[in-house]
Each structure stands twice: as structure tokens, then as C-alpha cells.
Image (cartoon, rainbow, N blue to C red):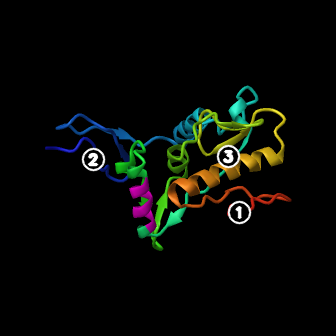
Amino acid sequence: MQPTSVHAPSGRAACHAPAGTTAWMAAPSLAQVRQAVIQIRRRKSMVLDPADPNARSVGSFFMNPVVSTETCAAVQARAVAAGAPGAGEMPRWPVPAGGVKLSAAWLIERAGFRRGHRKGQAAISDNHTLALVNRGGATASEIIGLAREIRDGVRAAFGVSLVPEPVLVNVSFGDAG
């Protein structure tokens, strides 16, 4: 059996190719990479666009938590026990300094929060689970209230506390009991 993709030599990028074949293409230019990144970010409403109501956010609100390997196993066991979709392939990445990074978006979705979930005029983006958006006239209290609801729901479901990524000025994120 042959791999469906291969590592490319320096200066070249590998393409996914049918089994038994090897395909190569020239490395993309800086402008092409920039355009590809902007397109991906636009699909997630992470590019300023006055016509996109999901672009009214501070970007990703929660950081991906880093936990111990034991906590990672416990989180996965809870996800499997709850019948969470994809629990057997829970996304995780080893951290060089020790521990395991988990996907905050995956935890949020598996805790029952869907894209578009609202609390007043604050909502989870329709396009990006980590982005909390202002649907028009949301107060800081509404945004923080939604963030707390998500944090507390993830903690209840998985025993992991999510931490906000943006710097909060004159606003307390507080702690759930």
C-alpha cells in the first residue's frame, strides 16, 4: 500500500495524489498564501466585513486549554460516555513543555453549544464556534454572560475550565463555583 501524500523536498509542496502516484507542484508565492489565508478567515467571519454580521467579534474568545495527560484521558472518557460525536478521535496535540492541548471549539460543541446560540444580543458566530459576536446592541454584560454560560457548560460536561483569550478591560470574567 502506498501513501496518498508524500513529503516534498525543500522548496516544493506535496499534493494529495491517488494511491500509487506522486504529484508535485511548485511552492505557492507569498501572495497566494496570503490570499488562501484570507479566504479561510473570511469563511470563518474573521475578516472585517461590514456586510457580515458574524464579523462583529473580538476573534476567538477562548484559548485552547492545556491539560495533563490524565485530564485528557478523563475528558475523552466523559465524551465517550456521553456519546459525543467524534469522541473516539477527540482532537488533541502534545505540548513540548508537557501536557496536551485540547480544542476549545470541540469541547464547546460537545458540551451542547451550537453555532448561532444566543443570549440576548450576544451569540456564538454562525461560522466559527470560538467567536462570540454582537448581533446588534449587545452589552459587555451580555457578551460576558454568554462566555460564562459556555465556560460553565464546558466545565460541567468535561471538568475543564476555558480561559478567555482577549484582554478584558474593566470587566470581570469571574469564576463559577
| Label 2 sits on residue | 6
Q: Which numbered disc, 2 or 1, marks the residue that appears first in the sequence?
A: 2
Tag of residue 85:
none
Magenta residue check for 75:
yes
Left/right placement of residue 88 relative to residue 118 reads left
Left/right placement of residue 111 relative to residue 57 reads left
Label 2 vs label 3: CA separation? 34 Å
Residue lying at 60% horizontally and 57% vertically, measured from the top left: 63
Q: Is residue 158 above or below residue 105?
A: below
Q: Which numbered disc, 2 or 3, marks the residue that appears first in the sequence?
A: 2
| Label 1 sits on residue | 175
- The amino acid at mark 1 is Asp
Label 3 vs label 1: CA separation? 22 Å
Secondary structure found at label 1: loop
Secondary structure found at label 3: strand
Magenta residue check for 123:
no
In the rendered image, residue 37, in percent from the top left (x then y), is placed at 56, 40
The 10 Å Cα crowd at callout 1, few under 14, some 14 to 19, many 20 or more, is few
Residue found at the very far left of the displayed protein: 1
In the rendered image, residue 4, in percent from the top left (x then y), is placed at 24, 41
| Label 3 sits on residue | 59
The 10 Å Cα crowd at callout 3, few under 14, some 14 to 19, many 20 or more, is some
- Which SS type dominates the magenta stretch? helix
Q: Which numbered disc, 3 or 1, marks the residue that appears first in the sequence?
A: 3
